[in-house]
Image (cartoon, helix red, strand yellow):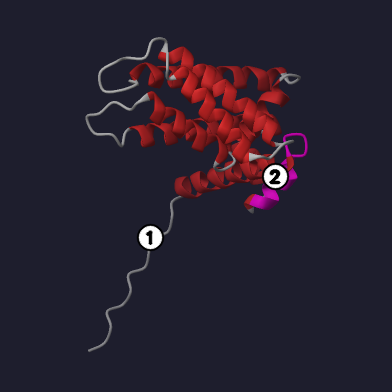
Amino acid sequence: MGKAPAKSRPRPTQAERSDAMRVRLLEATLDIISEEGWAHTSTQKICARAGVSRGAQTHHFLTKDSLLIAAVQEMVARYQGHMDAALDDDDAMKPRLQDLFDFLWDACFEGNLLNCWMEAMVAARTDPPLRRAVQETDTRSIQAMRALGEACIRDHNNAVPSAADIVELTVYLLRGMVVQNAVHPDNKHRARLFEIWKTLVLQV
Protein backbone atom coordinates (compact mmCIF):
# COMPACT_ATOMS: atom_id res chain seq x y z
CA MET A 1 0.00 0.00 0.00
CA GLY A 2 1.51 3.31 -1.06
CA LYS A 3 2.18 6.19 1.28
CA ALA A 4 -0.43 8.87 1.49
CA PRO A 5 0.76 12.05 -0.17
CA ALA A 6 2.22 14.51 2.32
CA LYS A 7 0.01 17.47 2.96
CA SER A 8 1.61 20.65 1.75
CA ARG A 9 1.83 23.46 4.24
CA PRO A 10 -0.26 26.48 3.41
CA ARG A 11 1.81 29.34 2.11
CA PRO A 12 2.22 32.14 4.66
CA THR A 13 0.03 35.12 4.05
CA GLN A 14 1.41 38.55 3.23
CA ALA A 15 0.63 39.67 6.78
CA GLU A 16 2.50 36.66 8.24
CA ARG A 17 5.53 37.32 6.03
CA SER A 18 5.46 40.97 7.03
CA ASP A 19 5.29 40.11 10.74
CA ALA A 20 8.15 37.61 10.38
CA MET A 21 10.29 40.23 8.64
CA ARG A 22 9.59 42.75 11.38
CA VAL A 23 10.62 40.20 14.03
CA ARG A 24 13.87 39.45 12.15
CA LEU A 25 14.69 43.15 12.02
CA LEU A 26 14.11 43.59 15.74
CA GLU A 27 16.08 40.43 16.59
CA ALA A 28 19.00 41.59 14.45
CA THR A 29 18.88 45.05 16.04
CA LEU A 30 19.04 43.62 19.56
CA ASP A 31 21.87 41.26 18.64
CA ILE A 32 24.01 43.99 17.09
CA ILE A 33 23.38 46.47 19.92
CA SER A 34 24.48 43.80 22.39
CA GLU A 35 27.55 42.82 20.38
CA GLU A 36 28.79 46.18 19.10
CA GLY A 37 27.09 48.87 21.17
CA TRP A 38 24.55 51.50 20.24
CA ALA A 39 26.98 53.83 18.43
CA HIS A 40 28.15 51.11 16.04
CA THR A 41 24.69 49.80 15.19
CA SER A 42 23.70 50.74 11.65
CA THR A 43 20.76 49.92 9.40
CA GLN A 44 23.17 48.31 6.93
CA LYS A 45 24.40 45.85 9.58
CA ILE A 46 20.86 45.21 10.78
CA CYS A 47 19.55 44.49 7.28
CA ALA A 48 22.47 42.19 6.51
CA ARG A 49 21.97 40.25 9.77
CA ALA A 50 18.21 39.99 9.23
CA GLY A 51 18.49 39.05 5.55
CA VAL A 52 16.24 41.98 4.65
CA SER A 53 16.69 44.56 1.91
CA ARG A 54 17.07 48.23 2.77
CA GLY A 55 13.78 48.93 0.98
CA ALA A 56 11.96 46.32 3.04
CA GLN A 57 13.45 47.77 6.22
CA THR A 58 12.19 51.27 5.43
CA HIS A 59 8.74 49.80 4.74
CA HIS A 60 8.58 48.63 8.36
CA PHE A 61 10.71 51.32 9.97
CA LEU A 62 11.09 54.48 7.95
CA THR A 63 14.18 55.74 9.78
CA LYS A 64 17.01 54.30 11.81
CA ASP A 65 15.62 56.05 14.89
CA SER A 66 12.20 54.44 14.47
CA LEU A 67 13.85 51.00 14.23
CA LEU A 68 16.03 51.58 17.28
CA ILE A 69 13.11 52.96 19.30
CA ALA A 70 11.00 49.92 18.34
CA ALA A 71 13.88 47.72 19.51
CA VAL A 72 13.94 49.60 22.84
CA GLN A 73 10.23 48.98 23.31
CA GLU A 74 10.67 45.33 22.32
CA MET A 75 13.42 44.91 24.95
CA VAL A 76 11.19 46.03 27.77
CA ALA A 77 8.15 44.12 26.47
CA ARG A 78 10.17 40.89 26.49
CA TYR A 79 11.63 41.58 29.90
CA GLN A 80 8.17 42.24 31.32
CA GLY A 81 6.82 39.15 29.58
CA HIS A 82 9.54 37.01 31.13
CA MET A 83 8.71 38.38 34.57
CA ASP A 84 4.98 37.83 34.17
CA ALA A 85 5.48 34.26 32.95
CA ALA A 86 7.87 33.36 35.77
CA LEU A 87 5.76 34.86 38.51
CA ASP A 88 2.52 33.38 37.16
CA ASP A 89 3.91 29.89 37.78
CA ASP A 90 2.84 30.05 41.44
CA ASP A 91 -0.71 28.78 41.78
CA ALA A 92 -2.53 30.40 44.66
CA MET A 93 0.67 31.44 46.44
CA LYS A 94 1.86 35.00 46.08
CA PRO A 95 5.57 35.16 45.25
CA ARG A 96 7.96 36.18 47.98
CA LEU A 97 10.22 39.19 47.64
CA GLN A 98 13.14 36.76 47.77
CA ASP A 99 11.76 34.99 44.68
CA LEU A 100 11.37 38.26 42.82
CA PHE A 101 14.95 39.28 43.67
CA ASP A 102 16.28 35.97 42.37
CA PHE A 103 14.28 36.35 39.18
CA LEU A 104 15.57 39.89 38.61
CA TRP A 105 19.15 38.65 39.07
CA ASP A 106 18.67 35.96 36.43
CA ALA A 107 16.98 38.39 34.06
CA CYS A 108 19.90 40.81 34.33
CA PHE A 109 22.72 38.34 33.71
CA GLU A 110 21.18 35.79 31.35
CA GLY A 111 20.76 36.87 27.75
CA ASN A 112 21.35 40.29 26.24
CA LEU A 113 18.24 42.30 27.10
CA LEU A 114 19.70 44.31 29.98
CA ASN A 115 22.94 44.98 28.09
CA CYS A 116 20.87 46.41 25.24
CA TRP A 117 18.76 48.46 27.63
CA MET A 118 21.82 50.01 29.26
CA GLU A 119 23.13 50.92 25.79
CA ALA A 120 19.81 52.60 25.00
CA MET A 121 19.71 54.55 28.28
CA VAL A 122 23.24 55.89 27.81
CA ALA A 123 22.55 56.85 24.18
CA ALA A 124 19.29 58.57 25.22
CA ARG A 125 21.19 61.17 27.25
CA THR A 126 22.17 63.06 24.08
CA ASP A 127 19.34 61.98 21.74
CA PRO A 128 16.03 63.79 22.53
CA PRO A 129 13.69 61.57 20.44
CA LEU A 130 15.26 58.44 21.86
CA ARG A 131 15.19 59.93 25.37
CA ARG A 132 11.42 60.44 25.15
CA ALA A 133 10.89 56.84 24.05
CA VAL A 134 13.23 55.50 26.74
CA GLN A 135 11.59 57.62 29.46
CA GLU A 136 8.09 56.49 28.54
CA THR A 137 9.04 52.83 28.21
CA ASP A 138 11.16 52.77 31.35
CA THR A 139 8.47 54.48 33.42
CA ARG A 140 5.96 51.79 32.46
CA SER A 141 8.48 49.07 33.24
CA ILE A 142 9.38 50.47 36.66
CA GLN A 143 5.70 50.87 37.53
CA ALA A 144 5.06 47.24 36.59
CA MET A 145 7.97 46.04 38.73
CA ARG A 146 6.81 48.17 41.67
CA ALA A 147 3.39 46.53 41.36
CA LEU A 148 5.04 43.12 41.52
CA GLY A 149 6.85 44.22 44.66
CA GLU A 150 3.60 45.29 46.27
CA ALA A 151 2.14 41.86 45.51
CA CYS A 152 5.03 40.05 47.18
CA ILE A 153 5.24 38.85 50.74
CA ARG A 154 8.40 38.16 52.72
CA ASP A 155 6.90 35.03 54.20
CA HIS A 156 3.46 33.49 54.34
CA ASN A 157 2.16 35.88 56.99
CA ASN A 158 3.98 39.19 57.04
CA ALA A 159 3.85 41.82 54.33
CA VAL A 160 7.08 43.70 53.57
CA PRO A 161 6.81 47.45 54.24
CA SER A 162 7.61 49.62 51.22
CA ALA A 163 8.13 46.55 49.03
CA ALA A 164 7.58 48.60 45.85
CA ASP A 165 10.39 51.00 46.83
CA ILE A 166 12.68 48.11 47.72
CA VAL A 167 12.06 46.48 44.33
CA GLU A 168 12.72 49.74 42.47
CA LEU A 169 16.00 50.24 44.38
CA THR A 170 16.95 46.64 43.58
CA VAL A 171 16.36 47.22 39.87
CA TYR A 172 18.65 50.27 39.95
CA LEU A 173 21.30 48.32 41.84
CA LEU A 174 21.22 45.52 39.27
CA ARG A 175 21.42 47.97 36.38
CA GLY A 176 24.57 49.40 37.92
CA MET A 177 25.98 45.89 38.20
CA VAL A 178 25.26 45.28 34.50
CA VAL A 179 27.23 48.42 33.61
CA GLN A 180 30.05 47.44 36.00
CA ASN A 181 30.21 44.01 34.38
CA ALA A 182 31.52 45.59 31.18
CA VAL A 183 34.69 46.63 33.03
CA HIS A 184 34.91 44.10 35.86
CA PRO A 185 33.32 40.80 34.74
CA ASP A 186 33.46 39.08 38.11
CA ASN A 187 30.17 37.28 38.56
CA LYS A 188 31.09 35.67 41.90
CA HIS A 189 31.89 39.05 43.45
CA ARG A 190 28.64 40.57 42.15
CA ALA A 191 26.65 37.58 43.40
CA ARG A 192 28.22 37.91 46.87
CA LEU A 193 27.33 41.62 47.02
CA PHE A 194 23.79 40.92 45.87
CA GLU A 195 23.37 38.32 48.61
CA ILE A 196 24.43 41.01 51.13
CA TRP A 197 21.83 43.38 49.65
CA LYS A 198 19.09 40.77 49.93
CA THR A 199 20.03 40.02 53.53
CA LEU A 200 19.84 43.71 54.41
CA VAL A 201 16.53 44.55 52.76
CA LEU A 202 14.71 41.34 53.65
CA GLN A 203 15.28 42.16 57.33
CA VAL A 204 13.15 45.30 56.98
Q: In the picture shown, does residue 20 fall above or below 100?
A: below
Residue 41 highlighted magenta (yes or no): yes
Could you tell me residue 180's position as x and y percent?
A: 69, 31
Horizontal side of 199 relative to 34 (left or right) equals left
Per the image, the residue denoted by label 1 is 10
Magenta part of the chain: 37-49
* Nearer-the-camera pick, 183 or 63: 183
Q: What whole-number distance in Å separates the C-alpha atoms at marks 1 and 2? A: 36 Å
Could you tell me residue 14's position as x and y percent?
A: 47, 49
**Picture residue at 44% right of the left edge, 17% below the top:** 146
Could you tell me residue 195's position as x and y percent?
A: 51, 30
Residue 7 highlighted magenta (yes or no): no
Secondary structure beneath dot 1 equals loop
**Mark 1 and mark 2 residues within 8 Å of each other at the beta carbon:** no
**Picture residue at 67% right of the left edge, 22% below the top:** 130
**Picture residue at 67% right of the left edge, 35% below the top:** 181
| Viewer can see residue 137 | no
Residue 42 sits in which quadrant? top right
Which quarter of the rendered picture does the N terminus lie within?
bottom left
Residue type of the residue flagged with mark 2: Glu
**Mark 1 burial class by Cα count in 10 Å: few <14, some 14-19, many 20+:** few
Residue type of the residue flagged with mark 1: Pro
| Viewer can see residue 75 | yes
Per the image, the residue denoted by label 2 is 35
